[in-house]
């Protein structure tokens, strides 16, 4: 059974850096073809893809956010970490990680973690 | 503003069929057969319902079906049930990234 769980701070201040960790089980990110993506959803709004890391450590970022994002993995710990710099209140959202299927479909998703940006 | 366009809401009565459209461009929906559909109930994570335009993952009811014509993909739900009431999002692969639609709220009357 594949599961993913996001963890990180619930509240960050403007200008701070957000670090989120996705801990997963049921698959290995060292297996050819595997990948993990981060997706976020502001309250009441649509989903937005943020970043992806592949089994071979290739990394892909949203064009609009790539200057602020870094994605990395620790295969031995079954974890993927996303950092987002210079947080702003508009970044308030539920952040999800999800396993990628051939880099074009997400299944399954983690439960999500709500991050609020406020002073 | 989302890259893919979906109607904000659709509704139907139990037993009826509804279709949700997802319109993109030749750079995303029209350029790849990599459209997915997700169902999201309030307060829950999205769930994959359709992938690669028309494929259903194991465990998803065959009442859900997907198709595509040109730059527009569609999700059809037949035999509507109360439990289908949720938000639905389409997504498309596009040049090493993923675009999502704005989401459609399905109301079962």
Image (spheres, coloured by chain):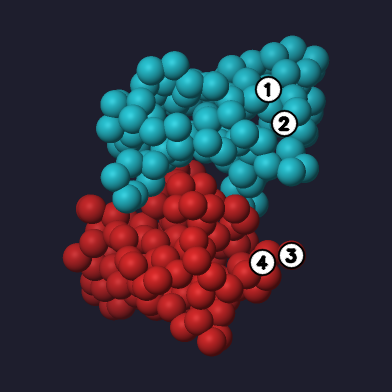
Measured as percent of width and height from the top left, residue A56 is found at: 40, 71
Instruction: Choose between A62 and A93: the one closer to the eye.
Output: A62
- Frontmost of labels 2 and 1 is 1
Would you say B25 lies left or right of B65 here?
A: left
| Dot 2 or dot 1, earlier in sequence | 1
Residue neighbourhood size for the residue with mark 2, other residues' Cα within 10 Å, grouped as few (<14), some (14–19), many (≥20): some
| Residue A23 figure quarter | bottom right
SS label for mark 4: strand
Q: CA distance from mark 2 to mark 1?
A: 8 Å
Q: Are marks 3 and 1 in contact (CB under 8 Å)?
A: no
Residue neighbourhood size for the residue with mark 3, other residues' Cα within 10 Å, grouped as few (<14), some (14–19), many (≥20): few
User: Which residue has dot 1 on it?
Assistant: B77
Which quadrant would the N terminus of chain A be assigned to in this image? bottom right
User: Which residue has dot 3 on it?
Assistant: A1
Would you say A97 lies left or right of B76 here?
A: left
Marking on residue B84 = 2
Q: Colour of chain A?
A: red
Marks 2, 1 in one chain: yes
């Amino acid at each position: 059974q594949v599961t993913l769980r996001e963890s990180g701070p619930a509240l960050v201040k403007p200008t701070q850096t957000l670090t989120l960790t996705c801990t997963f089980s049921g698959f290995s990110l060292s297996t050819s073809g595997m990948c993990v993506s981060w997706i976020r959803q502001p309250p009441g709004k649509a989903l937005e893809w943020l970043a992806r890391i592949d089994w071979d450590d290739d990394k892909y970022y949203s064009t609009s956010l790539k200057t602020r994002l870094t994605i990395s993995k620790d295969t031995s710990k079954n974890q993927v970490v996303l950092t987002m710099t210079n947080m702003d209140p508009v970044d308030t959202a539920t952040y999800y990680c999800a396993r990628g299927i051939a880099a074009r479909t997400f299944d399954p998703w983690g439960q999500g973690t709500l991050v609020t940006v406020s002073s | 503003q989302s890259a893919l366009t979906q109607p904000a809401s659709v509704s139907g009565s139990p037993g009826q069929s509804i279709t949700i459209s997802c319109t993109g461009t030749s750079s995303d929906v029209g350029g790849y057969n990599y459209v997915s559909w997700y169902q999201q109930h309030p307060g829950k994570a999205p769930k994959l319902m359709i992938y690669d335009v028309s494929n259903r993952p194991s465990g998803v009811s065959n009442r859900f079906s997907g198709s595509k014509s040109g730059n527009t993909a569609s999700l059809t739900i037949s035999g509507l049930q109360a439990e289908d009431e949720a938000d639905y999002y389409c997504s498309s692969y596009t040049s090493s990234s993923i675009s999502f639609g704005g989401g459609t709220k399905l109301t079962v009357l």
